[in-house]
Amino acid sequence: MSDLLSLLSLGSAGIAAQNTGVSIASNNVANVNTAGYSRQRVDLEALVGMPLVGGVRSGSPERLQDNILAGRIRLANGSLSMSTASADALSDLEQRLTGGTSLGEQISTMFKRFGEAAASPTDPIARQSVISSIEDLVDGIHQRAAELDAAKAELNTRIKDNAKQATELAKRLADANKSIGKTNDPVMRDERDRIASQLSSLVGGSARVDSDGQMRFVLDGGAVLVDGTHASALEATPDPATGDTSLAVVDGSARRDVTAAIRGGTIGAQLGVRDGDLAKARTALDQLAYDVVQSTNSVHAANAGLDGVSGRNLFSSLGGVAGAATAIAIDPAVEADPSKLALAATGGGPGSNAGALALFQLANQNVAAGGKTLGNAALELVGNVASAAASATDDVKRDKLVADNLAGLRDSLAGVDIEEEMTNLARFEHASSAMTKFVSTIN
């Protein structure tokens, strides 16, 4: 009787083991379209029973996943998010700078009007045309300065919003670590990997799974955002000096500024564009405005208007390069009375056009910073942004290729193959049916 009971026990354990295999295969098939799902496998372990030899039991479901590959995928996702965000921000910046009539064309038009006025320096219509072209240039510079400031404000807002999202993801990652520490659920491990990938896409950094099974997430520069079941906050606050959004990892009373350290993910791209290309474009625009004012004022002041008076500025004086694009303005007295345009040489009389010719000739002189003409400086300002945008677009293509290749490697390891799972399902079902017949026979 004891032998028969042992055989019944063997059969019962066999049915349970095969049914576990059926459940695992069915679960894999059910999740074939679930994003981030890692297929599971059950290992059957042979048992030895005395005096009979035989029996089987199923181990815990094994999640087919490679931590090294998962880490590479997170890095690739961070790079792709960074290049994509950079390309988007730079493309937006390029559109803001190139909308409407370009600065190069407005500068060229101003010098063209000086040339036309040289042909008839006393003609009030020609003088008014000069004033109108200068007003257009001033408006163009003001508009682009406002666009750059608006782009900067938008980036600051996005950085703040993304920092809030990163803090929430860090908390969810810590909660996932806590759940895994209690149950070691493979589904929760998939969820943890998805959270870590989303976090990498936002802030770059790196995640690792230590020997205790807990995941740590570290930002570029070494600041720890998630340490096992404990998460710090990524806090965004306005910089007191510049007003720009700055970032800090906050853990209780401890605070570490990481604004300069984050150079990955979407936030890293937004910080990079804000503090890099956008800041350079704003400085270049200020420099261009300053050079326009300084070069034309020096020539204009050396010549005289129809009233014979010299020493007048064409533009209002500027205090320096910083903020020049916002502050640039035509001199109110000259704007109100075009006869004060200094188109004549000092003492040359109303018919003189020496001042107009001198202003016209500035078009081909290297009076802009860096030994460039004003027109070339305007073209270079836009060209630098366009070049950076094109480079970022190329980076997107490269990073997407890398990410797709790594995703393919993951699918080959952890992805669900319907045909393979249907074969496993049939195999376990047949074994379960055979064990059921065996138990029936023993019974």
Image (spheres, helix red, strand yellow):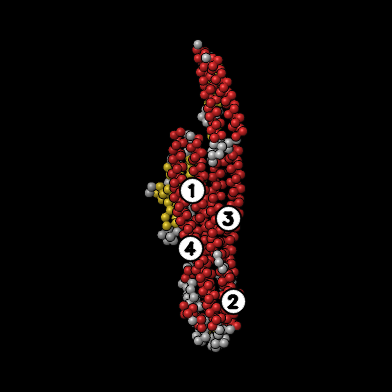
Measure how far apart labels 3 and 4 are at the Cα level. 22 Å
Tell me the mark number nearer the camera, choosing from 1 and 2: 2
Tell me whether the residue at label 3 lies in contact with that at label 4, contact meaning CB atoms closer than 8 angstroms: no
Query: For mark 2, what is the residue?
Result: 112
Of the numbered discs 2 and 3, the one sitting upstream in the chain is: 2
Q: Label 2: state its secondary structure.
A: helix
Looking at the image, residue 115 lies above or below residue 174? below
Q: Amino acid at mark 3?
A: Ala
Q: Residue furthest left?
A: 253
Query: Counting residues from the N terminus, which is met first, the one under dot 1 or under dot 3?
Result: 1
Q: Nearer the viewer, mark 1 or mark 4?
A: 4
| Residue at image mark 4 | 149
For the residues labelled 2 and 4, the Cα–Cα distance comes to: 30 Å
Q: Residue furthest top?
A: 1
Amino acid type for the residue under numbered disc 2 = Lys
Q: CA distance from mark 1 to mark 2?
A: 55 Å
Instruction: Please tell me which residue lies in front, 372 or 9.
Output: 9
Q: Earlier in the sequence, mark 1 or mark 4?
A: 4
- Res 220 visible: no
- Residue 378, position as x, y percentages in the image: 57, 68
Q: Along the line of sight, which residue is nearer the eye, 25 or 395?
A: 25
Residue name at image x 53 percent, y 27 percent:
20
Q: Which mark is residue 219?
A: 1
Q: Earlier in the sequence, mark 3 or mark 4?
A: 4
Q: Are marks 2 and 3 in contact (CB under 8 Å)?
A: no
